[in-house]
Image: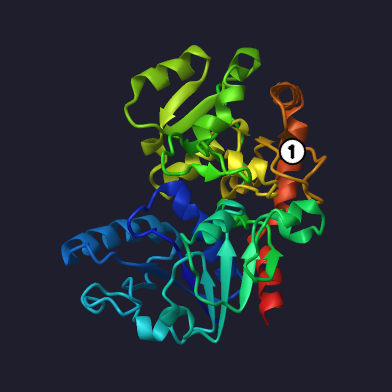
Amino acid sequence: MRIVLSAPNTLGYPDGGHVWVFINWALGFRSLGHEVVWLDVTHDKDTPEVVAALLQEMRSRLAPFGLDSQIALCTEAGDAYAHEAELGLYPLEDALGGDLLCDHRYNLPAKIVGRFKTSMLVDIDPGQFHVALDVGTYKPAPHDFYFTVGEWAKFTHAQKAMFNTHGFHWQYTPPPVALDEWPVTPAGPDAAFTTVSNWFMSNEWMPAPDGVWYDNSKRAAFQDYLDLPRASARPMELCLNIGTYQPEIDLLGSKGWRIVKSQATSHPQDYRRYLQNSLAEFSCAKPAYVRMKTGWLSDRTVCYLASGKPVVIQKTGESDIFDGRLGMLRFETPAEAQSQITDVCENYDKHSQAARAIAEQHLDARTVLARVLERCY
């Protein structure tokens, strides 16, 4: 089967962590024996020279995984890119003859979506995406199937009532990880609890049900947890896109955080290396995921787990898969987070083995995506 994977903004923003979301999906489909075509969208403002340079950069990031030879591009209007042949692109017309569109974009042109025999939309931002639908930021073209990585879609209690489904039948799927690309990797003696994130997000304020808007940045998420490094037996480190705002960097340093600039993980290979050199993950979730009880699990977290790295992460809603598990500890308060960090430090081998077991049992891309395909056919 030919699967066209529509990836958002990997042409203009080929950042290591961002691209890995879709690499894991692509490799999962390929491991099941399917042909994968990578589809992205050009911006009308970009000159042919800019597009050629961006494409070269994207190919360099996808080449180590054998995903660089079948890249298709379309315009914002849904037409074939004018310089398709000279750039060695996969012909858009051939891509549109594919068996399945796996669409991670929320704004792929309807004239593209409608050409596929079967199409599915994948929501990796549960809650945030639904608010964007509410306010009209996105008006996705009709798809045949709708999947979300938020466990909210499995439940029928009040948690589910928080979302306007917009008439779509949402089905839950955990985020997949290509296990062969994320082998268990021992942590070094100075390894830290880490995470990778943007820090300031001025354009991500979210409306609460009472109409008051709140800061949905990672900076806001971490505010109640900034003192944790002082009580941790192992270093705690943030790999951040934080710009050059030195006062913020100094503040975090004064609290005991080690700071690494996100440029260190800009290539997918570097991103993988950074996660695998870590002791474990510690991360707070964006406030919207927590407030809306989405049951969201990060595509970054699944890579830590596959690598045998325990995760200490903020709870984003109920889970009948991950709650109460060794290897994945979910906190709701600073006191719980501190206790869980201590537990990981004192029982590291047990949690490390359990982390990989969670990935193998619940997140293996071959199993996860086989189940997705079973629901589409």
Q: What is the quadrant of the C terminus in the image?
A: bottom right
- Residue 310: x and y, percent? 68, 36
User: Number of labelled discs?
Assistant: 1
Q: Quadrant of residue 81?
A: bottom left
Q: Residue at x 24, y 72 (%)?
A: 87
Residue 252 vertical placement versus 166 (above, below): above
Count residues near mark 1 (Cα–Cα under 10 Å), then give few for <14, some for 14-19, many for 20+.
many
Residue 76 pos. (x, y %)? 33, 71
Indicate whether 150 appears above or below 322.
below
Q: Residue at x 38, y 44 (%)?
A: 266
The three-letter code of the residue at mark 1 reads: Gly
In percent of the image, x 80 and y 41: which residue is there? Answer: 325
The quadrant of the picture occupied by the N terminus is bottom right
Which of these two is toward me, 189 or 233?
A: 233
Occupied quadrant, residue 153: bottom right
Q: Position of residue 287 (x, y in %)?
A: 59, 38
Residue 124 appears in the rendering: no
Instruction: Tell me if residue 109 can be seen.
Output: yes
Residue to which mark 1 is pinned: 327
Residue closer to the observer: 320 or 64: 320
Q: Nearer the viewer, residue 146 or 13?
A: 146
Q: How are the residues colored?
A: rainbow
Residue 210 at what x, y percent from top left? 62, 43
The image quarter containing residue 150 is bottom right
Dot 1 lies on which element? Answer: loop
Query: Which residue is situated farthest in the front direction here?
Result: 210
Classify 338 as above or below 267.
above
Q: Is residue 81 shown left or right of residue 366?
A: left
